[in-house]
Every structure is written in structure tokens, then in C-alpha cells.
Image (cartoon, grey):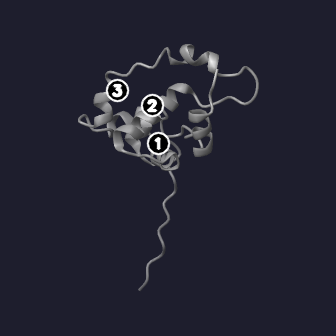
Amino acid sequence: MMGPRQVDQAALFYEFSLERHVPAAHLLRAIDRFVDLSDVRGHLAPFYGSTGRPSIDPELLVRMLLVGYCHGIRSERRLCEEVHLNLAYRWFCRLGLGGEVPDHSTFSKNRHGRSP
């Protein structure tokens, strides 16, 4: 006899920590100990306009570039996809589970299009 299809009701609340899911020996954890980008916004402020839509956070941009360099991800489109999917990359970029990864075209424009 065929049993009824079991459908689980989704949990209303989840407790999830990226910190616990990134291994202690992960390369990005070792790099993160030495990376302090707290003052990068101040240094890059002259390169950003005061009007228009907000751009990508410069710290996020630099952290994503570090992920790409360290893991050999040469395509900006692929880098954005990988950061979206990989928990360790999200942790390193300070995105959490719900953080928005920039679109690859916006990422590329910010990386190549800034001039004083």
C-alpha cells in the first residue's frame, strides 16, 4: 500500500551560525586574522560621488576580491555566484545568510569604473 506523502511544515525560526560552519583550518579564517578593513571607507570616500544610488560597500568589494584571488576565481560573474553559495565566503565577506551579494555587472563597474 502506498503511504501518504509526508510534507514537513517549515520551521518558523532558525538558529544558524556561519561562525560554527567555517572550519578552523580554512584558508579564509587564517587570512581574516590579519585583514583589518575598518578604515577603507575613509580612504576611498573621495572616489565616490555624493549623489545617485548607493554603491557596493568598499569593504565588501575588497573582501570579495581577496576571496577571488585566494581561490583562483578569475571571473567576476563566477565570483559573485560563489560568494552567494559558499558559507565560508559569506562569512569572510561579512554577509551572513541573508546578505545580498552584488550583481556581477555592478561589481565589475565598481571595480573598473572609479576614477578621482
* Mark-to-mark CA distance, 2 and 1: 27 Å
Q: Is residue 101 above or below residue 9?
A: above
- Helix or strand or loop: what does disc 1 sit on? loop
Which residue was labeled with disc 2?
63
Identity, as a three-letter code, of the amino acid under mark 2: Arg
| Residue 113 visible here | yes
Q: Nearer the viewer, mark 2 or mark 1?
A: 2
Tell whether 65 sits left or right of 104.
Answer: left
Which residue was labeled with disc 1?
14
- The residue under the point 63% across, 16% down is 46
Label 2: few (<14), some or many (≥20) within 10 Å? some
- Helix or strand or loop: what does disc 3 sit on? helix
- The residue under the point 50% across, 65% down is 7
Which residue was labeled with disc 3?
32
Identity, as a three-letter code, of the amino acid under mark 3: Asp
Q: Are marks 3 and 2 in contact (CB under 8 Å)?
A: no
What percent of the width, then of the height, locates residue 33? 31, 23
Task: Name the quadrant of the C terminus.
Answer: top right
Residue at the limit of the structure toward the bottom, as seen here: 1
State which tag comes first along the sequence, 3 or 2.
Answer: 3
| Residue 17 visible here | no
- The residue under the point 49% across, 34% down is 95
- The residue under the point 58% across, 39% down is 107
Q: Nearer the viewer, mark 3 or mark 1?
A: 3
Residue 109 got which mark? none
State which tag comes first along the sequence, 2 or 1.
Answer: 1
Tell whether 13 sits left or right of 49.
Answer: left
